[in-house]
Amino acid sequence: MSAEPIEETIRKFALQNAAFFKGKANPKAVVGKILGGFPEYRSKTAEITQLINSIVAEVNALSPEAQKEELAKTAPELLVKEKKERTYELPDLAGAEKGHTVMRIAPGPSGPLHIGHTRVSILNDEYTKRYGGQLILRFEDTNPEKIDPEAYDMIPEDLAWLGVKCTKTYTQSDRFEIYYDYTRRLIEMGKAYVCTCNGEKWRDLKEHKLACPCRDLPVEEQMERYDRMMSGGYEAGKAIAVVKTDIAHPNPAIRDFVALRLVDTPHPRTGDKYRAYPMMNLSVAVDDHLMGMTHVIRGKDHLNNTLRQKYIFDYFGWKQPEYIHYGLVNIPDTVLKTSLIKQSIQKGEYSGWDDVRTGTVRALERRGIRPEAIRRYWIESGIKSVDIQFSWDGLYSMNRDIIDPISDRYFFVQDPVRYDIEGTDAIVGQAPLQPDHADRGFRFYRLDGPKTVFITEKDSRAFAQNKEVRLKDLCNLTYGTPAQYAGNDTAVLKKGVHAVQWVSRNSVPAEVLMPDGTVARGLVEETILHEPSNTVQFERFGFVKLEQKTSEKVTAVYTHN
RNA sequence: GCUCCUGUGGUGUAGCGGCCAAUCAUGAGGCCCUCUCGAGGCCUCAACAUGGGUUCAAAUCCCAUCGGGAGCACCA
C-alpha cells in the first residue's frame, strides 16, 4: 500500500470515511488516519493537510453511490467496518516474574466470606495461576473481640468452593511473639514509644501535629515501659506501643500509629496467654515482609495503611511489595455485615449463614450461583482504582450463560388452579429436557382416565378471559367447566394463544425459596424425580436449584430468571 | 477541616496523543426465531464530568473547577 502514490491512499480513506458517514467525509478524520498510518508525513503536515482537503472536497462532490462504487473497485476491503474482538483478561502485574510471585488473602475470621470478599480472592488466585507463584491464606485474628471461631473453618471452605487454591496458611495469633520482637526492635531504634496518655488526649495532640509527653522519653525509659507493658504492669487501655512516623505530617491519617494495645478479652485460640494485641499495621507489615510478599492486592480503603506500613518497612530497610489498590465496590440491596447476619441468625430471623437474603458465599452457592460466574464477573470488572457498582443483573447474566445449557426443563405450577378436561380419550405428549439439546432426551406425558391438570392462578385468569390456552407440549383447551379438549395443533400459537406450563394429578407439591425469603408454593411435574442434576429451569418461572426431591415433596431455591 | 484515590452510555469495561465522529458485555426498546417470561439472531437507544491550555492532531498530556469515594480508631 505504501508503494502507491499518497494521493490514492488519501482518496481511499476519504471514500471510506464518506461511505461510513452519509457521503460526507471529514477531512480531519482523514488527516488523522494518514498521519497515524504514515508517520513520515508528520513533518509535512501543512502540505499534506492541504492535499487532503482538496481530495476530500472532490470526494464529497460525488454522489454517495458513486463514492461506494469507486471504493468497491479500488479498495473493497475498506467497505466493511472491522469488528474488533475483545478478550477479557486482567492486566499484567508490575514486576511479576513467573514462579516467583507471592500473594495473599488476609481475612479477619469474623464470619464466612461474602460476595465482597470474593473479588480480592479471585484476583489473587487469577494472578497466582498466571504466574505460578504462592498464594498465602493468612488469618488476621489480632482482635480477640471480633472473632468467630467457626470462621477458621468456614473461610477455607468458601475459598475451596470458589476454586481459589491457597498454597499455605498462616494464623497471626500463632505469631504474637514475632510482633512483640519487632516492636521491641523499633523501640530500641527510637522508632517507637510506649504511650500511657489518655487516648483522647493522644489523638487530640496528634490532630494538632503535637507529640505527647511519652514520645520523646529516652529509649531506656521506653524499654522499661515496654517490659512493664508486656509483663502485665499496665491495665488494659492504659498503655500502647506506638510507631513514630512524622507527627507533623500533612496527612493526619498517617501521623504516629498504634502498634500494640492491651486487651483483657480472651482470644478464642490463645485464651488469656497474651494481653498485648498487635494492630494490623504492625502485624501486616511484619508478615508481608517475613512471608516474602511480592504483590499485594487490597482495596483502596487501605491506601493510608500502605503509607503507614511503609514507615515500618523503611525503618527495617525492607523492600515493600508492589501494591495494587482496587476501587471500592458498592453492593446494592444486600446484607453483608457478618455481625448483623450473626445477630439475625441468633434471633432466628435468618436460617443460617446461607440464608438467601444475605450476600454470603454460602447463600450464593445455595441459590445456584456458580463460582465460575463469580470469577468471570470479577475478571471483567478489572482491577482499576475506580469505585464501582456491583450489578446482580450482570452476575446473573454470566451465571445464566453457564447453567442454561445444562439445566433440564420442568413444569412448576405456582398457586395451582384445577381444570378437568373433557372431549377426548387419553392425551399423550412429550417435551425436550433442554430445547437446544434434544439429545438430552424428553419428558413423556400421558393423561388417562379422569383428565385433570393444574395451571397457575395467573394463567387461569388469562384462560378465563381469552377462552383459549395451550398446555405446552400437550394440547389446546377451550375454556369451560370442565375445559374442552381442542386438538393439538400448535398453529394456535401463531394466533396469539399462550402456551403455559401445566401439571397432572401425579404432580408433586413443591416449594421454591425466593431471594427475598418468601416461598412460592405449587406443584411440579413428577418427571423431575428422575432428574440427576440439582440445577434445573422451571419453565416460565426461572432457574432453580433443587434441594430436596422425594415423591412427597420437592423443595428448591430460586436462582434467577 | 486536612490528606489521599478517582471521573468513558443506566451498569461494568476497552482505548491512554493520530488507525476512535469511541470497543465489548449487560440493560432498555423493537423485530425474527423458538410450543418457556430461558437461549439464539438482527436492529435501535445511550458515554469521553465541565472549562481552559499544549499540539497540525487530545477521551488520551497539563491546569482549574465540579462530582464520587476513602482515611484521619487502643477495627481489619
Image: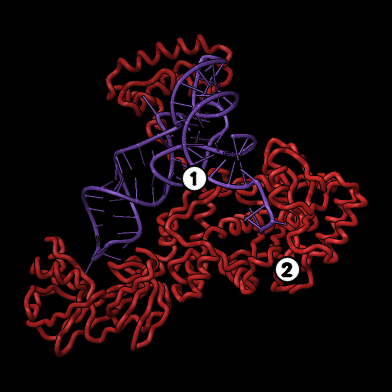
- Which image quadrant is residue A557 in? bottom left
Residue at screen point 90% across, 52% down: A221
Q: State if disc 1 and disc 2 touch (CB < 8 Å).
A: no
- Residue A419: image x %, image y %? 14, 80
At x 64% / y 49%, what residue is drawn?
Answer: A302
- Mark nearest the camera among 2 and 1 is 2
Q: Which mark is residue A513?
A: none
Instruction: Read off the residue under disc 1.
Output: A86
Q: What shade does chain A have?
A: red
Tell which circle, 2 or 1, labels the residue nearer the N-terminal end.
1
SS assignment at label 1: loop
The answer to whether B9 appears left or right of A383 in the picture is: left
Question: Taking A307 as reference, is A4 left or right?
Answer: left
Res. A264 mark? 2
Q: Position of residue B21 (x, y in %)?
A: 40, 29
The front one of A315 and A539 is A315
Report whether residue A139 is seen: no
Is residue A60 at all visible to an observer of this figure?
Answer: yes
